[in-house]
Image (spheres, grey):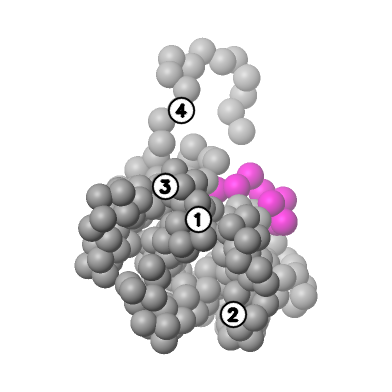
């Protein structure tokens, strides 16, 4: 189904762009945590490839694409090298990096969902795999950096919700047999725009209703 939506060259290019941007975010966190060059490279690789690796292992697409395409492995290293030498300049364009990160989120939730369905998963499971593809690398990044994953924190702008919306749109299109390049593009753009709006207006998920805890908030 992926081949019907995008040509292999377009799919590969989009994957590398998303991987590069995710790797930038991982490398920047490593710099903030005062990691050495190896730590920067590891966090860049994990952030960029973690979600896709998890999806491929679960759906049985082995060996994962990250181990069969050298470009997938080298692109995060390029991002790590860029951040290692130029991180003050990269920090200054953090807003631009966040925009591309949102674009990667939209792209990966669509391609992850579609690939999972291609490998025999049901609609709900495919949507879950789309979400995992989009946010899995970020979760692993935060865990390795000894932080509570961003998508679990109430004080962070919505991240997982836009990916859930995009993945849900894809499975609904599959269910009603209307998944086309235009429809998949609309799902990716919807997730992208929702993430941008969440960053712009600081949209956050609600916490437990009628909280009366006396425990100090973290």
Label disc, if present, on residue 123 of the rendered structure: 3
Q: Quadrant of residue 218?
A: top right
Magenta span contains residue 130: no
Image: magenta residue range? 143-150
First in sequence: mark 3 vs mark 4 = 3
Secondary element at tag 1: loop
For marks 2 and 3, give the one nearer the viewer.
Answer: 3
Ranked by sequence position, the earlier of labels 2 and 4 is 2
Q: Quadrant of residue 105?
A: bottom left
Front label number (4 vs 1):
1
Residue that label 1 marks: 120
At label 1, counting other C-alpha atoms closer than 10 Å, the crowd grade (few under 14, some 14-19, many 20 or more) is: few
Residues at circles 2 and 4 in contact by the CB criterion of under 8 Å: no
What is the C-alpha distance between the residues marked 2 and 3?
A: 27 Å
Q: Which is more toward the observer, 88 or 199? A: 199
Residue ID for mark 4: 207
Task: Report whether 156 appears left or right of 106.
Answer: right
Residue 72 shows which numbered tag?
2
Q: CA distance from mark 4 to mark 1?
A: 35 Å
203 above or below 131?
above
């Amino acid at each position: 189904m992926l081949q019907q939506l995008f040509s292999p060259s377009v799919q590969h290019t989009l994957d590398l762009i998303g991987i590069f941007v995710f790797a930038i975010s991982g490398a920047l966190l490593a710099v903030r945590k005062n990691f050495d060059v190896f730590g920067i490279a590891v966090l860049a690789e994990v952030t960029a490839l973690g979600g896709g690796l998890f999806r491929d292992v679960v759906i049985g697409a082995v060996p994962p694409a990250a181990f069969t395409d050298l470009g997938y492995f080298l692109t995060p290293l390029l991002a790590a090298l860029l951040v290692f030498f130029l991180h003050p300049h990269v920090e200054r364009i953090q807003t631009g990096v966040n925009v591309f990160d949102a674009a990667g989120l939209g792209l990966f939730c669509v391609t992850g969902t579609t690939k999972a369905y291609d490998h025999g998963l049901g609609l709900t499971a495919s949507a879950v795999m789309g979400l995992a593809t989009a946010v899995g690398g970020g979760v692993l990044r935060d865990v390795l950096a000894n932080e509570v994953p961003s998508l679990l924190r109430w004080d962070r702008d919505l991240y997982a919700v836009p990916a859930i919306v995009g993945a849900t749109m894809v499975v609904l299109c599959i269910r009603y047999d209307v998944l086309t390049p235009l429809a998949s593009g609309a799902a990716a753009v919807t997730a992208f725009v929702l993430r941008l709006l969440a960053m712009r207006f600081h949209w956050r998920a609600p916490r437990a209703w009628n909280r009366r805890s006396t425990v100090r908030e973290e």
